[in-house]
Image (spheres, helix red, strand yellow):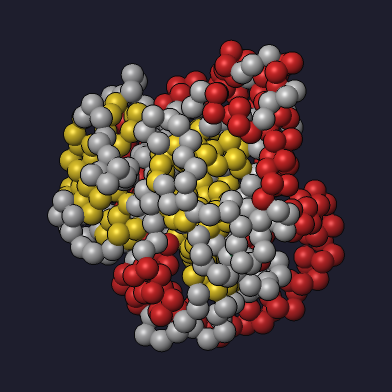
Amino acid sequence: MAGVAARRHVGNLVSPPFYRFVLGPARRRRRAANTSLMETERWPFERQRALQEQLLRRLLAEAARTSPWYRERLPGEADLAHFGLDDLRRLPILERKDLQDHVEQITGTGRLASGVGENQSSGSTGTPVRIYQSREYFVWHAAETFRGLLMCGPIHPWTPRAYFWGNALQSREHRGLSGTVHDIMVNTLWFDAFSLRRDTLPETLRRLRAYRPRLIVGYMSIVMEVARALDRPLDGLDAIQTTAETITPQDRSVIESGFGAPVFNRYGTNEVGTIAQECHLHDGLHVVMENNIVEVVGPDGRPLTTPGAEGDVLITNLRNFATPLIRYRLGDVVRLGTDGCACGRGSARLESVIGRTSDIIVSPAGVLLHGLFFLKLFYGAPVLSFRVDQETPERLRLRVVPAARYSDEVRQRITSQILAHGDPRFEVVWEIVDEIPRSAAGKYRVTVNHVPRVTVARTETTPPAP
Ligand SMILES: [Zn+2]
């Protein structure tokens, strides 16, 4: 363990100058966005709304220019110039199905701009979606992510932190000599959230303890597994940022007492970045109004406004001009909070995120697999939606709604990936269905474990900044 402790020591020496003199100057646009977000979060609610309105008009004009899909659905140029936030409700809702079937039409020429990257949904519905994101989106996403970390305490970009995050691809960047050097420079200890196993948890805990992070960032489900395995709190830990799903008071108390530090819940997705995050008062989640317009609608599609009301969340991302997402239904259910907060931040708030749960699948060999593992396997497959039920320790039932090009070959490929990357002892049973039902509580779930205990979920996989 001396290795991990030494890494932190070296990281503490080299990381601050690395950020100050190398990364910082290279990230001029991101720094400007950081500075801007630190100012606007203190603006009163109405002023933040005015900023949203301005950004919305810009987004709509850009969407009308580049996207054939929106050109048909948006009002003319003259109307857009006066378009207000309250007019948004007149625009059609963008369903995941629309995005799945028409992403190229929705994107149009937006994908041709320089710096555009491809991303995939991390949604909770088991409906994989691919989108494009613009350079401006990445800059503001990085800035909002950093501001989210600052809400957890007085941290610097070089504050030592540990991540329980990501898939094999992202984790590859953290392996080997180059991965270790990179992680030392940015003062980070990385645990691949898809490879945690119950039998190696003690080793994970020893490394974590030796590293002494001041901040831990991770998927709620995985962080909870780690918290349960801890026999005493971590020394020197200031905060734990969990990526949001439904976090019950019980979950929170398990994590906080296990680690000995407060939990800050964050709600985000790959498609639109951070939607909302808790401040140190832990009284609901502050909406990132500078980047996303959040609407909460009832079953009839009408916006709800009363604090405490529950409904579907629709997001309009104000920073992505590649695949514009306007009134995009994520498939999550949230509860509205009140505006303003005793912390002084002026944003709207969500009281809680309700419909975002899935279970951890525990393989016969003790590998912990959460919803994202399966979402990755289905990415790009001709499947409209799916759900995984663990019926016994060995048996997984995969329910799929097939798309046009679905074939036996798809079934065999995904099954063999589950056996290769999950556990060869799984028995995988496939079932073709017309629809994946919501649960009684209106929740979509990617994974349902009928065997053991932990109820958990997944959120986004976009690499965290800084
Ligand atoms: Zn607050």
Locate the C terminus and report the quarter of the image it occupies. bottom right
Front-lying residue, 432 or 272? 272
Residue 96 location, x and y as percent? 44, 30
Q: Is residue 398 left or right of residue 132?
A: left
Say if 136 sits above or below 281 in the image.
above
Residue 330 location, quadrant: top left
Residue 418 location, x and y as percent? 30, 47
Q: Residue at x 42, y 39 (%)?
A: 312
Residue 152 location, quadrant: bottom right
Q: Residue at x 20, y 36 (%)?
A: 430
Can you see residue 182?
Answer: no
Q: Residue at x 45, y 31 (%)?
A: 302
Residue 101 location, x and y as percent? 45, 22
Q: Is residue 333 left or right of residue 4?
A: left
Say if 418 sits above or below 103 in the image.
below
How many marks overall?
0
